Amino acid sequence: MTEQFVNEVLDRLASGELSEYFVKKDDFLPFRQVIVKRNDFKHFRGIAQRGGDVLYVYLETPRS
């Protein structure tokens, strides 16, 4: 999973083109390394799934 791909997915979440994005356990760390660098990091919510996978959604208001 490349940084460019992750940023494209995050941009699509932010624009509303995607409502959610599922990240497998093996891809979580590379995905997280990119997401924490973004200015809109607080707008993304990762919802833990069974088995270590994460479902990401974009929030209109940033979490505190």
Image (spheres, rainbow, N blue to C red):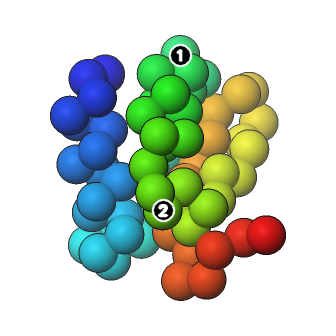
Q: Amino acid at mark 1?
A: Asp
Q: Foreground: 61 or 55?
A: 61
Instruction: Work out whether 4 lies above or below 60.
Output: above
Asked if residue 22 lies left or right of residue 25, the reply is left
Residue 61 in view here: yes
Instruction: Work out whether 35 lies above or below 58.
Output: above
User: Which residue bears the numbered disc 1?
Assistant: 26
Q: Earlier in the sequence, mark 2 or mark 1?
A: 1
Residue 57 is drawn in which quadrant? bottom right
Helix, strand or loop under label 2: loop
Q: Foreground: 26 or 63?
A: 63
Across and down, in percent, residue 26 comes to 53, 16
- Disc nearest the viewer among 2 and 1: 2
At 28% across and 60% down in the image, what residue appears?
11
**Farthest residue, direction bottom:** 60
Across and down, in percent, residue 8 comes to 22, 48
Across and down, in percent, residue 39 comes to 46, 57
At 35% across and 54% down in the image, what residue appears?
10
**Farthest residue, direction top:** 26
Asked if residue 55 lies left or right of residue 6, the reply is right
User: Which residue bears the numbered disc 2?
Assistant: 40
